[in-house]
Every structure is written in structure tokens, then in C-alpha cells.
Amino acid sequence: MSQNEIKQQIAQYLGSHPFINLATVTAEGAPLAHTVAFVADGATLFFTTRKDTRKAANMQANPKVAYTVDQDQYAGFAEITGVQMEGTATVISDPQEIAAANQLYRAKFGEAATITPSDMHIVVKIAPVRAYFLNYAKGFDHKDLVEY
């Protein structure tokens, strides 16, 4: 399978799931996991969070993040699929980029949902760096690696 085909599978997978398990690093160097609702434009993710959260502080101090996306339940090991992604998080302020992310957010979560910044909230973009697409139908622990 080509790199482009794997990237397309990853984009489709991200588009069909509502949450990621986001890993950040604290100032003390400890890992911290967060469940985050997100939207995807290909393999680029967007979400909003309060400015005073631990994840916001962690990402601003160290923008290197990782996340996973997978199913909650499987009938058997051969059905396991998922994405393991490494990326770079940035707070975005460009009105056009925020408007595009907001449009994706409303399409995914409903017209009442917004992803706009405010005095209390920031909009975060995660640019992909490296990903593994898990597909155990191809064999136990099968992962396809792609670089962005």
C-alpha cells in the first residue's frame, strides 16, 4: 500500500471518530493523557480548550504531542484498527483557519457546537508529523508507518 493510500485511510478514520486520547508532557516531564473532542481536515486536527487547562499549559510549553484513536469494542483481535499519531500543537488565531475549523466542527457535532476562541478558550491545531495506521486484519500488531 502506498504512503498516499495510508494517509487517505488515516484521514477517513479520523473523520469517523469523535474523540482522541491526547498525550502531553507536564513541566515536570511527566506524561498526561486527555480525552478531546476534535475535527480533522485530512490528518490535521483542531479542537478547543479552556486557556487554564493543564493540556493548554503543557502544549504551550512543549508543542510535541501524541494521540491515539481507536474503537472502544471489537469482536476479535483481527478487527482492531486505529491511529497512533505524533504531531505538533499550536494555538491558532488566523480568522480564516478558525472559520474553516468551526465549519468542520459544526458539521460533525451540530450547529450549536463552536470551536471559536474567546476570553476563556483557545483553538488548537495539531499538525501531523508521523503516524501508524493499525490494521490487525493484515496480521497481529500490523502497523503501516507514514511521515508527513
Image (spheres, grey):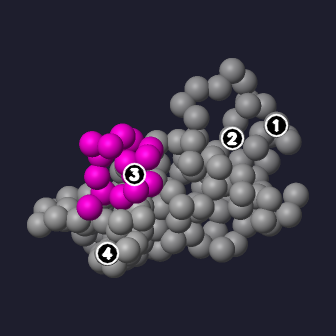
Point out the image quarter for the N terminus.
bottom right
Checking the image for residue 105, the label placed there is 3
Between the residue at mark 1 and the residue at mark 2, the CA separation in whole angstroms equals 8 Å
Question: Of circles 3 and 2, which is in front?
Answer: 3
Give the foreground label among 1 and 4. Answer: 4
Q: Earlier in the sequence, mark 4 or mark 3?
A: 4
Q: Which residue is mark 2?
A: 81
Q: Amino acid at mark 2?
A: Thr
Please state the horizontal and vertical placement of residue 95, each as a whole percent of the image: 31, 75
- Which residue is painted at 33% across and 78% down in the image? 94
Q: Is residue 37 above or below residue 49?
A: above
Q: Nearer the viewer, residue 11 or 109?
A: 109
Give how far across and how far down residue 74 sits, in percent.
65, 26
Q: Report helix, strand or loop for mark 1.
A: helix
| Mark with earlier residue (4, 2) | 2
Give the Cα separation between the discs numbered 4 and 2: 35 Å
Q: Is residue 143 above or below residue 51?
A: above
Instruction: Identify the secondary structure beneath mark 3.
Output: helix
Task: Decide whether residue 137 is among the magenta residues.
Answer: no
Q: Amino acid at mark 4?
A: Pro
Q: Residue 126's x, y, as percent?
A: 46, 67
Tag nearer the camera, 3 or 1: 3
Question: Magenta residues, as a range?
Answer: 102-116
Q: Where 138 falls versus 100 (above or below)?
A: above
